[in-house]
Amino acid sequence: MPASGRPPWRPPSARDLAALDRLVQAGSVTPLQRDEAIHTAYAWRVSLPDVLSAMYRVTSLRWARELSAASGLPLVDLRASPCDHTLLAEAEHDLYLRHLFIPWRRQPDGVVVIATLNPEDPAIRALMRERMPGCHVEFVITSKFDLIWAVQRIFDPELSEAAREALFNRNPELSAKVTLSAGQKTVAVGIGLALLLALGLAPRLTLLGIMATVSALYASLFAFRGVLTIVGSGRRTDISVNASELAALKDGDLPVFTVLVPMYHEAEVLPILVDSIRRLDYPRAKLDVKLVLEAGDTETIEAAKALGAEDLFEIIRVPDSQPKTKPKACNYALRFARGEYTVIFDAEDSPEPDQLRKVVALFNASGPEVACVQARLNYFNRDDNFLTRMFTLEYSQWFDYLLPGLYRLNIPIPLGGTSNHFRTEVLHELGAWDPYNVTEDADLGIRLTQAGYRVAVVNSTTFEEANGVLHSWINQRSRWIKGYMQTWLVHMRRPVELYRRLGPVGFLGFHMFIGFPPMTALINPLLWIMFLVSVIVGRSAVAGFFPGPVLVLALFDLMVGNAMYVYFNIVAVAKRRWYGLVPWGLLAPAYWVLHSVAAYKALLQLVTNPHYWEKTTHGTSSRTQETIASLKAGSATGNEAQ
Amino acid sequence: MSSGANHIQVRASGPLVTRAWRVALVVGGASFLLFAAAAHKLLLAGAIEPALRESWNHANSQMLLSGQWPMFVMINLLHLIPGCGPSSMVVITITATALAQGLLARDLIQRGWSPGLAASGILVTSANPVIVIIATSGAPMIFYTIVVGLLILAIDRVEAIADTRALILLGVGVAAMFVLWPNAIYWVAPTLIVLPLAFREMNSISAAVALFTIALLPGFIVVSSMILSGAMFGRPPAEAIAVWNAILHGAAPQEVLHSAWLASFGGQFTAAFVALALMCATIAPRSWLIIWRLGLNRREQTQPATALAALLLPPISGALATYFWHLDAPIVVVACSLAAVASWTATASLRHGERAAWVLLSLAGTSFGWAAPLLWQDSGLAHLRHILLT
């Protein structure tokens, strides 16, 4: 293997070229396309069948047939003629998937027959020699999807178990399977009792102490947000990959990129997804796209099949099991990933075409400590209604200012839900996502930092659909807040160790960014009520809680702090020049009320149903509907023309 | 005028940075000694003690309510330190002034100035009577003056880079001015005129709304907070707003008659304004260099906002304050002019001859300042001058 860890590229073999000629003779590929395909295979340093599949829609099965005919090797259908399980080793399924082969049968003379798409891959022989010293191997041809299907079917129980429990089995303390550890329960009960005792003995002093603490907490949060916004607002923060670095990338040097797209009951946005992937400026034959679908979601599975997309779109059926969460589905699909890098996209995502190239350039320019690159997220339907506008302001601040600020200050970055690009190897090393955490991405960001890795932020945006339906927004937000609560609780099981690993700034940032925001969303309504009481009844009603310095701090929080929060919200759109949203930023306090509603729902669910995944409904915006309609119309026109 | 981007590029050189900091230390230290010697004389003569004691003893909720938040925090913090008294406030103001002078020296060196020229120009400015009196006053005016300098730097950043940080710094700068002196209100209108010149993306109504909102909202927040916090303590908002309505921001009429700048000209605005402009032109004559550059330098002509802001904002805002009977002494306006031009100098790529002219004009301003009769018309200031020069 070369230093990069990538399997070495081999030029098309005589068998490949013969199979290609058969395709030309059959009229499936024109002579011009033949030459282009060979040229592209050399330029991109990819296999010929990958080029044919990605560029000319030659299916994997069709290629297998022609290769079989050209090489004289038999073609087998692994569904009709299943593998001999005694030849398989559980620990090796990753190798089977990476090199696309599987030990199929043992002949009476002891020769092991390998089913593969690429009998000339020397790695297969080498692996078999290592696995079964002295044995002879022969080959039969099969298609890529037959191979994946076979591996999935044979190793399904193990893969499914690993997707759910790998992290917990490796380190239970890093999993949110248990919400509160025994130690945390003891501390929580202890604090509760101490508070009750203090309230009984010195109620006024205790309440005063609580108010002072809360006021100080708010002031520090405002200051922290302010610092992050100012740090993240500089022009230099935005330039992570420039045009010359992009231009220096050669197609042949680009690695295979796995794209995981977990979906659940989202059949209607599939055309958008396929269109977005096709628009990526990346050698298509180097894309390994997995549509990660729940086995029971037949509607989406059938819709995906009906699309008739290129073979680079693979369907991974995730077996039904609890918890039914996105991270579990991603864990499952990750075992099938062949890319050096892996990215998660949501079905309705529309990444900027150069995103993958920028990510590769950033990884190339960074040290091995950068294990993940987070792209910026924003919304394409920002003008739909109040919610989508506020969401856009919030995301603009989050991804354009706060995350770059966190990176600059070396504070752990809670990853956003999509468009996080990983070194696949590191994902495996860390046990991938926690299937019991409903903001698995944020949790993984903290685990990456704890393991000594860094998360960088790239100057490329993925546009998503903002949730503009109120009940759906509350559901989604309650999941996020619940996930942040889970993440904070998980990592605070060993606070001293966390402090040692993150350092003082990182530790403080972790609390400011992960722990305190859900807490403030819960506390806000209480403070608003106190404020209203003081306005209606008079200051004397709450004067007992606010003596001297506490009053100054509380007033500062109430007036300057909150207003500056609104201000930073407004400023957020300046980077993207979406000036029309500026006046809407003034309505942020109304948006905070919704946050608090979601926070109480999250708290309730954390107690009653911690692993429940509140599914976000996609495809509701008029813009999405228009895009789907136009893609369908385009597709229909294309079909008619054909 | 040079861009902020060039500024960043120059900063990349390591040895230059070290040398710049060394010069900054020397200039800052020398300025500190100069101010300390002046403060010592003034304190010994008892010239500033009563004013200091009044602020020291009134660091209570009244100061908080009237929006003097930095002063409130500073004095209350000093109260917590054993052994501190009213004169400690002078230590704070002269340290801040010396620090600002040191940082200016660093910026000039990083702009390519020779250490000798930069140090001499700034030390001559430190000896300017306006700077000496403001630095040794123990009052928040010096912070106001420093923020004016920072505001000019923010306008330059808006003009040269136009990133969001520039707009935020501008907004926060205006807000800081409001909590330091109510007269900051008179900066708003002229700044609104200069800003569109600086902001290259001013091509739509929504861009204009965004620019003004981002630049002015923090100031609005601060002023609203002053009024609201007053209301919470039972002070009617109308009374809080009266701070700006009232002559000299609520000062008693007899005080106006005795001390206000406009009153000294018998209420004749034109005469007061001419005198003010004359003082700016003579005590801070290096602003002439801006006119020179605007007339002859092509880069300055294509990006004139920073130069125009440094040249015009202090006298125009001073004129507005004069017109509305809110200027009690012109010394702050002249100090703002000195600070604004200093900041502009830190953003401009002056040629060697222009740098030498800058030093000579600074020297002329300092000399004229001590001799100019206009500045010393006020008996209190004349008393300070007498103490300092004898």
Image (spheres, helix red, strand yellow):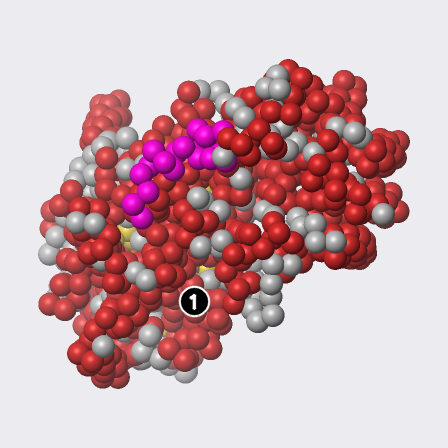
Residue B244: within the magenta? yes
Q: Residue furthest front?
A: B254
Q: Is residue B24 left or right of residue A9?
A: right
The amino acid at mark 1 is Leu
Q: Nearer the viewer, residue A14 or A471?
A: A471
Which image quadrant for residue A521? Answer: bottom left
Residue B83 vertical placement versus B308 (above, below): below
Q: Is residue A124 visible?
A: no
At x 62% / y 52%, what residue is drawn? Answer: B50
Q: Nearer the viewer, residue A430 or B162?
A: B162
Residue B330 vertical placement versus A354 (above, below): above
Q: Main SS type for the magenta part?
A: helix
Residue B357 at x, y percent in the picture:
86, 31
Q: Which residue is mark 1?
A: A508
Residue B57: within the magenta? no
State which region is magenta: B233-251
Residue A581 at x, y percent in the picture:
34, 32
